[in-house]
Amino acid sequence: MRKYFFTLILALSAAVSCVTRFPAEVAKADEPAVLSPDYTDVVVPFNISPLDFAIVNPGDRLITRITGAKGGEIVIKGREVKIGLKEWKSLLDDNKGADLKVEIAANRDGKWVALNEFSISVAEDPIDPYLVYRLLAPSYEFYTAFSIRERDLTTGKDREIYNNRMHYNPKEQQCMNCHQFQNGRTENWQMHVRQVLGGTLIVTGDESRKVNLKTDQTISAGVYPAWHPSERLIAYSVNKTRQFFHAKNIHKLEVQDPASDLIMYDIDKNEVSLVANDSLAFETFPTWSPDGKYLYYSSARQPEIATLPSDSIAICFDKIWYDIVRRSFDPGAREFGDEELVFDAKSLNLSAMEARISPDGRYLLFSLGEYGTFHIWHRGSDLWVKDLETGESWPLTDANSDDADSFHNWSSNGRWIVFTTRRDDGLFTRTYFSYFDRDGKAHKAFMLPQRSLSGKYDRVYSYNVPEFTVEPVRQSVRDLSKMISQPVMKASFSGN
Amino acid sequence: MILRTNKSGWIWRALVYAGMALILIPKLPVIRKLFALSLWPDMTFYLNVGFQPGFVLPVTGSVLTQIGGIPVIGIILVLLSMAVLTLVTRKLSGDGVHSMLPAVFVFLFITGFDYSLYTFRSQGLLFSQTLGLLFSALIVWGWTAVADRKWNFLYPLAAVLAGYPLIGAYAVLAAVGIFLLCVSEKRWVSAFTALACAGLIPLFYTHLVFTHIDTAYTFVAGLPYMDFVDNHKRFLPLGLAALSLIVLPLFKGRLRSGWPGLVTSVLAAAVLVACFLLFSFRDRNFHIELAMWHAVERNDWDKVLSLAVKSDKPTRVIVMYRNIALMYKGQLCDRMFTFPNETIDIDTPAQISQTEVCGMTVFFHNGLINYSARWAWEMSMMFQRTLERYKYLAKVALFTGKENPALVEKYLDIIDENMYQRGWVKKYRSYLNNPESLNSDPEYKMFTALDRFEEIKYMSSAVVENTILNHYLLQENPEGVMLDQSLAAAMTAKDTDMFWYFYDILLRSGRPVPRHVGEAAILFAYLDRNQAEIDSVARDLGGPNSPTVSRFVRFSSEASAFTPGGDTSSFKKRYGDTYWYYAYFVKSLTTN
């Protein structure tokens, strides 16, 4: 018995001695903590998965202590701060609406020094639990392997929804893009499949169809989609898209639409109708207001350019500036009103793209760049909002960076913005979130929690088309593979 | 005299391995390129491709390829892998010449690598299939150890269950091998089990476990089915290697276990040589291009030029590499037409373009570094990420001077994962930390000389030589090396208008007229039938009695007597080192 007793005491002593303690005596270093990713002084949702980070500052040994203003503490040693899901959740739950204080002690030459402490504010507003995104290496014209994936933002779990090797063909690849969900729910959603087994896959509940939206009367199949919030209607832009490559320009690549219009697809009738096809304007990137009564989109009305031959339009790539406009929509009559200017970017010699209306209908979120449509390749692109009640517009300064910030979306409660940015290295697009408070201010953005701190996991990939959803996608890779294998339906054209 | 003794087995094996080594030595450029076209494996690859059945083969194949980065080590590793495969085959099928068959066939598969290597999607192909065969052989060998146990029928079940995720189709091959052995020994239960496992377990895996892959490829997982598109005969040696591996054990004890006598040896050697001639890829230009590429990477311009002359009918890839070397040596317009300059297609039945073969390198050395980076990414996305492609991405990101240093660091970190690249990475990291030092880099110096052009607002870069010619032809007021390139482009494209434009700039600059430029000027003036122009050019070239003008007079009188369709060999002999020969007799330049 005595033998067991001493064994127990020894084991307990060992366990106690292994508990990480933050050093009691630490000298101030007056040195900011440099983290990768940078989570200093950010606002995070209380339901976010652990924000693991690596400490870049030098130190033979490092200890991090995260203390909640309303209680709770996590202490972790090492350069890589990997936080357990349970203790992180508990800490955030206890500190909704309060700050977490983060202290880092570095042991240098046997002495402990404290880096400047920083805080992480825990917002009471939750973020939508899922993010669906496309993962691929920076791509131009060619590709082989990429996937659409879903991240559970509350646990960090990541799964593949579909990958383009499901229908592998060595001579012709398969591309998929523009996944979009109706109101952030996964019952009704769509994505495009190009080349092998091409078509637009439209999932409505348990049913699916693959449609060819190209008609003789429209210039292309559907491109950028916008599900109507309540009707079985999807607005699309139709674009003649081309890419060209700069020989020396830092932007490297231009994606340009020498022609573009808007159409609407009626799912029940399998019918396409025109929304906007002004031959003197380029219309693209449609989006609905949350009440479904307005269709917003970007439009460049530049007759002097629109009437040029296609190759000449390409040369004018940096002289095409898109405004944001809207048309009223009567869902009953399926009729659109006249075009109204919402944000005049052209007068600033700038181009406004990807209009997104906040769920409460008050704010218009968009990206503003030097020219053109594809702002992820434009380093000057920033996120802006316009208050549709006051008419005032401003850049989201705290969320923006010196590099491209674009392709953004609102969470379902309107308190979180997700967007893509090239701020980290100028090439690989990463997903960031920013808290948008009730005063219309966007806070410092933070990176999607990382699955690996070594950087080796996804270092040569770009995350794009991030879409919030409130529930997981209901299909598996195989389900989608079968859906994509179905014969394509040809949509008809309605002149009305 | 080779006798049927144990000793003769060693002699035979030694001869075969010596033969393999001899074959591999001229293949050094191929091994170097395979090393450059591989990468130390990391999780990045699996993030998008996912864990596929047979994933161990590309991973171990990549590791061995990366270790074999020094070609001598590469050759030793290849020979070692053949030796180990032969050793295991001997255990299965008995000692004898036949035990070398799988290794010889898989060796022939490797020596058959052709232009397809630029478009390999499979990783580590230099070793992966040998390893697959080796694992198969080990599984079958394992069966021979348990064949007499009561529970022997569980062995194929366990082997395929554990083996399929790791080695893919090679686990199926092993099960088929076990099946054949069981049938030959009338072990019907085990035979049935092996066959059922071979047929069903892969389906179980691809339908229930590996749900992210296309089930159409269930039984070829781990094989290079994504490679050699339109070039399927390259698979034949691999098929024969697999077939021999599972058939040979059936004849254990029935084949003569000793080694053949003299006559049989001669016959076997003849068969081996015939197989080598049949299956290996020996295109001279292919090997010269690879050797030139290696010299270009080392900036060894004399070596590039000495390799160029080894091809009497060079491809445009060779011509482009050669012109890069001449540019660096400042001799482009003096020597470019002293080499053959015709349009010879690359020898491949597959749809592989010149841009895929050399676009990244050629764009880089012509100052079009955005296009170089573009093709590095295009090739990475279409095929695979490789050491070579990351090196160009790192250099381009560094040279632009406008990129985020984090991007350069990222590329350097990836390259640094290979043990042989530490020096390279150190050099470029020093440039990153001390940008001033970059000015002493010869490639950077050339880049800054070639970067003096206005942005081209719209141009395709899909066809490398066409893009480069257009780029130089579009220049306004080029100077220095850009002017040389523009003159060279005008001569190559036989664009007289642009030639005269650049020629005037050359004369205004006061620089001496390079040899080929003088030849082109006198020719174009002659073709214009403008005596004043002829006189003017003759003055530029040192007067009517200058060597160039005198030689042209002879050429023009002979050329005027030439009948179209006649024999051009005498012209080639006398004027093959002039622009006139190119202008008159080299027709229809094909840039892709």
Image: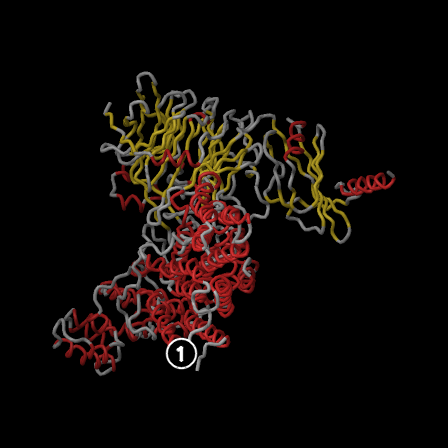
Q: Secondary structure at mark 1?
A: helix
Q: Nearer the viewer, residue A56 or B357?
A: B357
Q: What is the chain letter for disc 1?
A: B
x then y, percent, for residue A349? 39, 38
Circle count: 1
Q: Give amino acid for label 1.
A: Leu
Residue at 36 percent of width and 22 percent of height: A232
Colouring convention used in this rendered image of the protein? secondary structure
Q: Is residue A61 left or right of residue B68?
A: right
Residue A21 falls in which quadrant of the image? Answer: top right
Q: Is residue B570 left or right of residue A98?
A: left
Please, is residue B313 above or below residue A57 in the view?
below
Q: Is residue A419 left or right of residue B320?
A: right
x then y, percent, for residue B432? 54, 58
Q: Is residue A441 left or right of residue B588?
A: right
Image quarter of the N terminus of chain B? bottom left
Q: Nearer the viewer, residue A119 or B588?
A: B588
- Please name the residue that numbered disc 1 is placed on: B262
Q: Residue furthest front?
A: B186
x then y, percent, for residue A314? 31, 45
Image quarter of the C terminus of chain B? bottom left
- At label 1, counting other C-alpha atoms closer than 10 Å, the crowd grade (few under 14, some 14-19, many 20 or more) is few
Residue B277 falls in which quadrant of the image? Answer: bottom left
Residue at 67 percent of width and 27 percent of height: A94
Q: Nearer the viewer, residue A252 or A388?
A: A252
Residue at 61 percent of width and 38 percent of height: A51
x then y, percent, for residue B137? 48, 58
Please, is residue B528 above or below residue A19 in the view?
below
Q: Is residue B346 among the parts visible in the rendering? A: yes
Q: Nearer the viewer, residue B156 or A54?
A: B156
Residue B385 falls in which quadrant of the image? Answer: bottom left
Q: Is residue B352 among the parts visible in the rendering? A: no
